Amino acid sequence: MPIDRHFDNCMKTYFRILAFARPIEKFAIPYFFFSILGTLFGLANFTLLIPLLDVLFNNVSSEKLRYLLSEPTFGVNLYYAKELFYYYFAWIIVKFGKLAALFFVCAIIIFSVLVGNIFNYFAIRVLEYMRAHTIKRVREAIFKRTVSLDIGYFTNTRKGDIISRTTSDVYELEHTISNSLSLFFKEPISLLGFFIVLFSISTSLTLFTLIMLPFSAFIIASISRALRRQANLSQESLGSIVSILDETIGGLRVIKGFNAIGYIEQKFVEENNRYAGLMRAMARTRELASPISEFLGVMVLTVIMLYGGSMVLDKSSGLSASAFVAYIILFSQVLRPAKAMSVSFSNMQRGISAGKRIFQILDTIPEILEKPGAQPLPGFKQSIEFKEVSFSYGQEPVLKNISFNIQKGKTVALVGPSGSGKSTIADLIPRFYDVKSGSILIDGVDIRDCTLSSLNSLMGIVTQEPILFNDTIFNNIAFAVQEATQEDVERAAKIANAHEFILQTEKGYDTIIGDRGSKLSGGQRQRLSIARAVLKNPPILILDEATSALDTEKEKLVQEALNNLMQNRTALIIAHRLSTIQHADEILVIQNGEIVERGNHESLLLNDKGLYKRLNAMQAL
Ligand SMILES: Nc1ncnc2c1ncn2[C@@H]1O[C@H](COP(=O)(O)OP(=O)(O)OP(=O)(O)O)[C@@H](O)[C@H]1O
Ligand SMILES: [Mg+2]
């Protein structure tokens, strides 16, 4: 990429990052103010070295004292402050002697160090506030975007990648924000301050030192370019590590059961080695910056000592020895903001790369979007209709030309071999995915024309794998209904046949069920997710294998409860056990993404060669 385009790009990213700090003036203005004051007092300390050295070197002649003893005219500026200081300084020397003057200078140094540091403290505090504020908003934005993305996005993108972006990329970003303010405000101010003082001590010496700066800047810039490239690679690698870790912990049971620890360890070790290699490469480059700039700094300093020292020796130059010593001390202080600026600059580069990765997520447009001007569905009155629906996840067609109709209050069941596309059909109704061709209509309205929230408010979903959160049983059931009372929740649990086992848990409804419900049995998990759908009390129910993990007796109870619940309700049920769907109004037999048979239980059994009859016969065994 050409350098200026790249630079443009970086600046754009940078300003987008800063936009998260809004209202930025709330932070930038006080920061600016405190920084200037902090810097001024900091500078004052070093300038005070000159009179101090003058006294020690016996450099204060009586003529000079007489000159200093005329009271300065008042004004609000630095010059007046300096004159005033010298006035009292001279006055103390005359009245109390040199030792007292020494005390006087030291007292002022202590005072200005104290005040300067108080201001610095406030400056940094403002900066930290801004950092916390910005990071909070960035994380929030990533989280909101993650939630709004369609389900298909996550099957393509690794979970670990998103986790590492919300954690370590955001962490990298933190430094960019605070660093950039000190890069743009504080350090330039102190550099400027230092140079003003340096120029006022000796113009020619300062001009001489300035020549050496661009040379150092060039070296630092090339180091940070290399760092940026490596930082990108290392973040990707970290994402993979998080993914592996997540899969390992989630699948530990299988990993142990299949004796696959070696395999997963191998995978982890490989990625971890790659990461370590990248860290080493980064360290090699990054740690080069400090010794190089140190060396350059000392080199410059030595040249100044030679040049300035010769000026002092040559009495005609007007540079006194004490001014020169102060000059060198001041100059060594110039290196600090200069160094801080180069560190900030390289951190900022890293932050900008992290920012780019974060914006990749923030800029992802969900595939499932509400149309502009989408209308809310007023409710559910007549039917759900699949009209020649085809669908595929990738190239292979998964659903072909599916057409059927669920009238309000009726139950339609899907049966068929594993992988035939039943769950996929169910996923299309709440728009987890969009159809590739054809359409799905609710009361004659294409579901792509209505608002997502009104669509989802119509349905309760019990997924094939119960989805639970690490929270109390109560909250897992009441999850979608914020105003649910204890009674409501218990009633739902009773209908789902979960009440009894809930009471037997340690804290009843307040029991925390572990990550994804890991402290419960499969059947218990399923009943909780049924209770959740029961409580929501939606007009449309979508049940995917809702009864598969219950024993026969429980299954019957749940089935009864669901039958009650399904009265006046519209349901799409997917079940492998044909006994549970005998009473469905219509049964669709799905095979390879197509409807191969349809009818009710009795009529389907009449077809001797039919798949339904075969499936039924197999289950009877
Ligand atoms: N997220 C996905 N990405 C790609 N392919 C998928 C995805 N989900 C399912 N498939 C494929 O789509 C086909 C239909 O899957 P689906 O889950 O609908 O089957 P099913 O009828 O519900 O099976 P089961 O009875 O085992 O639950 C399968 O071949 C499956 O491999
Ligand atoms: Mg399925």
Image (cartoon, rainbow, N blue to C red):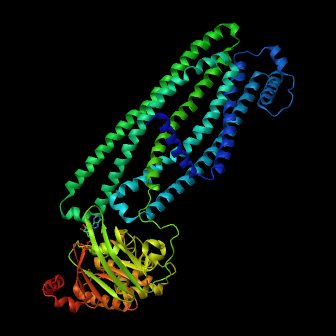
Against 8, residue 50 (above or below) is above
Q: In the displayed structure, does residue 580 sit left or right of residue 308?
A: left
Q: Is residue 439 visible?
A: yes
Residue at 34 percent across and 40 percent down: it is 278
Residue 509 in the image, given as x and y percentages of width and height: 42, 80
> Where residue 601 sits: x, y (%)?
23, 90
Number of numbered callouts drawn: 0
Determine whether, in the image, residue 456 is placed left or right of residue 24: left
Indicate the position of residue 270 as horizontal and vertical percent values: 26, 47
Work out which quarter of the rendered image holds the N terminus and state it: top left
Q: Quadrant of residue 494?
A: bottom left
Q: Nearer the viewer, residue 368 or 168?
A: 368
Vertical order, 293 against 207 (above or below): below
Left or right: where 449 falls relative to 134: left
Residue at point 51%, 76% (across, down): 376
Q: Is residue 67 above or below residue 442?
A: above
Q: Residue at x 65, y 30 (%)?
A: 192
- Closest to the observer: 568 or 499? 568
Q: Is residue 505 visible?
A: no
**Observer-nearest residue: 472 or 209?**
209
Q: Residue 429's image quarter?
A: bottom left
Q: Residue at x 42, y 63 (%)?
A: 149
